[in-house]
Amino acid sequence: MKTVSSIGAGKKDELNTLPLKGIPWLELQDQLREAGKDDVDWRNGRVPMFIHYAGDDVLEVAKQAYLMYFSENGLGLRAFRSLAKFESEVVEMGLGLLHGNALARGAMTTGGTESIFLAVKAARDLAKKRDSGRGKPQILMACSAHPAFDKAAHFMGLDTVRTPLQADFRADPAAIEAAITPDTVMIVGSVPAYPHGVIDPISEMAALAQKHGIWMHVDACVGGYFAPFVKQLGENIPDWDFLVPGVTSISADLHKYGYTAKGASTLFFRDAESFAGMGWSFDNWPRGQYTTNTLVGTRPGGAIAAAWAVMKYLGQSGYQRVTQRVIDTRCALQTGTTALGLTTFGDPKLSILAYGSYEHNIADIGVRMTAHGWLVGHVTTPPGLHHMLNLTHEPAIPRYLNDLSDSMSQASSSKQVGKLSAQY
Ligand SMILES: Cc1ncc(COP(=O)(O)O)c(C=O)c1O
């Protein structure tokens, strides 16, 4: 298994040491600025992922609120009633959007991966409680689901099974049903799945989960705070949240399309029984009871305060306004790539667009786009380019399409004409 190399490894002759004397802040500011000079220019739309920008005003609200609660710790809700209030209001606002009823519960976490870990833990523990005779518990999902489920499974002693997609890149409920075993403790659907940006058939998958008595998790880390507004704007997307019987839990990231500061996600449960497995409690040490809802202990108070402030600042009308502009940006990119002869993967209705080529070597196009100064996101199956859009891309689309056209005119042709494939 490949791992990230440890920081500083292999550079023994140039090791950085803690300075003997402190360096003045103004000097450090310069160094910080200088260090960022070679970063890819996300502000001008050159980064197709990692950033979710909704305007300078929203960024300012997030920053100011974060700074106001910079030192406070979300582990200490006894001390910081402010953070307890912000978190419970954020959870209530989220549950309202996702149609949780009075029994539904939730909590804030520090990101999508943590939300997914905790959903997996809760599903595993509930299955064990109900039927301790099971074998090694197993998570079942389409091959397009996020790797965080495999990461969680690896860390917590579960297996994963990934099934093929339908021709439209959505999860295939028939393949999922065929793969269910007595050890399946969770079925995962994505809204949307990251690689192709399409929404899985959640109702069908949740019906299967219900029929077989299995926990159904909807990973809406990308779409949780985007899809509800797309629907409010009149787009006909099928129900996927707690309105769908059988959906047990939902992960929805605030630091993506909630536009809040990084370090903020939400995890929601249909009822108190499913929520119970999220928490953990311990008292066999000399410092008394230690109870957390989350995987981490200390939690950044700033991220909790910023989430609360941005949600209140934008409100439903603000989110609708930004969502409409992101959808328009995705449509402009889709129209432009289609006009250039490229093929969109599936029928994306949200903020992700992925496309490939029958005629050109898409990897070669990617290399040429990199030379034009764009950070390129790749899809491997089928080979394609990938964008998760936000408002930084709105003014960048014409320039992007121009460079794309230029790259295509120089790129080699696909060796497998008629199939969407150009080998990496
Ligand atoms: C569908 C989906 N789920 C989960 C995650 C993990 O989120 P995070 O990077 O916040 O841990 C991502 C990240 O892009 C995602 O796209």
Image (tube, helix red, strand yellow):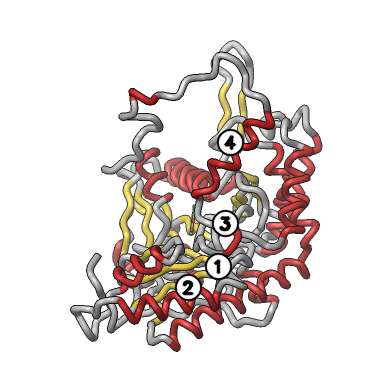
Q: Do the residues labelled 1 and 2 touch (CB within 8 Å)?
A: yes
* Other-residue count near label 2 (Cα within 10 Å), few / some / many at <14 / 14–19 / ≥20: many
Which residue position is annotated with label 4?
31
- Relative horizontal placement of residue 214, taking residue 78 as reference (left or right): left
Which numbered disc flags the more N-terminal residue, 3 or 1? 3
Q: Distance between the residues labelled 3 and 2?
A: 15 Å
Which residue position is annotated with label 2?
353
Q: Residue 213 carries which label?
A: none
> Element at badge 4?
helix
Q: How far apart are marks 3 and 1 (CA)?
A: 9 Å
- Relative horizontal placement of residue 354, taking residue 231 as reference (left or right): left
Q: Relative to the observer, which residue lies in front, 278 or 393?
A: 393
Asked where in the image residue 181 lies, by quadrant, the reply is bottom left
> Element at badge 2?
strand
Q: Relative to the observer, which residue lies in front, 290 or 143?
A: 143
* Other-residue count near label 3 (Cα within 10 Å), few / some / many at <14 / 14–19 / ≥20: many
- Tag 1: amino acid: Leu
Which residue position is annotated with label 3?
51
Q: Are marks 4 and 1 in contact (CB under 8 Å)?
A: no
> Element at badge 1?
loop
Q: Relative to the observer, which residue lies in front, 180 or 339?
A: 339
Q: How far apart are marks 4 and 1 (CA)?
A: 30 Å
Q: Which mark is residue 389?
A: 1
Residue located at (47% from left, 70% from top): 197
Residue located at (60% from left, 82% from top): 236
